[in-house]
Image (cartoon, grey):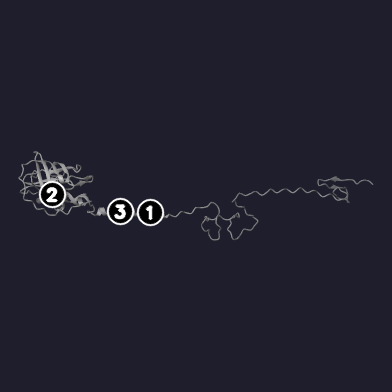
Amino acid sequence: MAAPRRGKRTQHGESLLLGGQRHDGWPPDRQAPAQRQAPAQRQAPAQRQAPGARQAPDPRQAPDPRRQHDLRGYPARRRYPAQRGYPAPRGRPAQRGRPVRRPRRPSARAATALAGLVLVIGGTFAVFRALSESAHTLTGGATMVPSTVRTTPPRTAADTAAALRASAPVRIIIPSLRVDAAVMRLGRAADGSIEVPPLANHNLAGWYERSVTPGQDGTSIILGHVDSYTGPSVFYNIKDLTRGELIEVVRADGRTATFSVDGVQEVAKATFPSGMIYGNTRYPGLRLITCGGPFDTATRQYLDNIVVYTHLVG
């Protein structure tokens, strides 16, 4: 039996017989072996996600209607994320991540310090206001006048010594007060008042040259400051003199005129009795004048004068 003639094989493996049936090249009684399938490809392992990273949602899964999503399917960003330690908005979970510190409340110590500062400022303002409004706030020192000082002239003793010839004073000595100061000449100021010694020199007195010299018949006037902002001056304590204490005046002729205290008077500068104090007496007298009494903080001056009355005893 002649072998069958094979036809031309096509690109798909089948052959065509001229005038014969189309077959795949195998006998009709035998079946072509099954083709081997390609081995299954291995699936790449899933990549590990960084801690805290969000996993993209499956686009095939329907979004949760209870949550708001953007167009990509991701949850919408919260406008006000909840902080750790504070309640989250209702219906939204608290955000996890870096902890947020609570704002510190002012401690009790800070509140006490603030209250103390307010009290100090208030007290300083009250003191300043009191000093600016009141003219009689300063006390002590020259403002304290003893009870032995009167507001009327003292009585003059009758046992006066004989008058001396004229001679200018050069020094004044008060043993009970430990005063030993030089005496300068004083005239009249531009406003008609009596000049005063320089305020900077605490141990200097001044003799009013239009009055008689100490020891002559009449009233001799010697002035001195009570104090200044730097300390007490020469006549600071003459308000403490009492009746019978002695005052010595060294004159230019070398003689010393000794006077005995009759009393001390306090007079107001506003109503100063110039005629009574500066007026001449019929016996040799000496008047010591300084400031004292209430102090006016606005004008920085004492409101009164302290006058010591004396008469010549030797």
Dot 2, crowdedness within 10 Å: few (<14), some or many (≥20)? many
Residue for badge 2: 308
- Distance from disc 1 to disc 2, alpha carbons, whole Å, reads 55 Å
- Name which residue type carries label 2: Val
Q: Are marks 3 and 1 in contact (CB under 8 Å)?
A: no
- The x, y position of residue 180, in whole percent, is 16, 42
Q: Nearer the viewer, mark 1 or mark 2?
A: 2
Q: Residue at x 13, y 49 (%)?
A: 308
Q: Nearer the viewer, mark 3 or mark 1?
A: 1
- The x, y position of residue 274, in whole percent, is 11, 50
Between residues 189 and 180, which one lies in front from this camera angle? 180
Q: Secondary structure at mark 2?
A: strand
Mark with earlier residue (3, 1): 1
Dot 3, crowdedness within 10 Å: few (<14), some or many (≥20)? few
Instruction: Quadrant for the C terminus, please.
Output: top left
In the picture, measured across the screen, residue 86 lies left or right of residue 32, that is left
Q: Which mark is residue 114?
A: 1
Q: Secondary structure at mark 1?
A: helix
- Distance from disc 3 to disc 1, alpha carbons, whole Å, reads 17 Å
Q: Residue at x 41, y 54 (%)?
A: 109
- Name which residue type carries label 3: Phe
Dot 1, crowdedness within 10 Å: few (<14), some or many (≥20)? few
Q: Are marks 1 and 2 in contact (CB under 8 Å)?
A: no
Q: Which mark is residue 125?
A: 3
Q: Nearer the viewer, mark 3 or mark 2?
A: 2
Between residues 74 and 114, which one lies in front from this camera angle? 114
- Name which residue type carries label 1: Leu
Mark with earlier residue (3, 2): 3
Q: Are marks 3 and 2 in contact (CB under 8 Å)?
A: no
Between residues 46 and 234, which one lies in front from this camera angle? 234
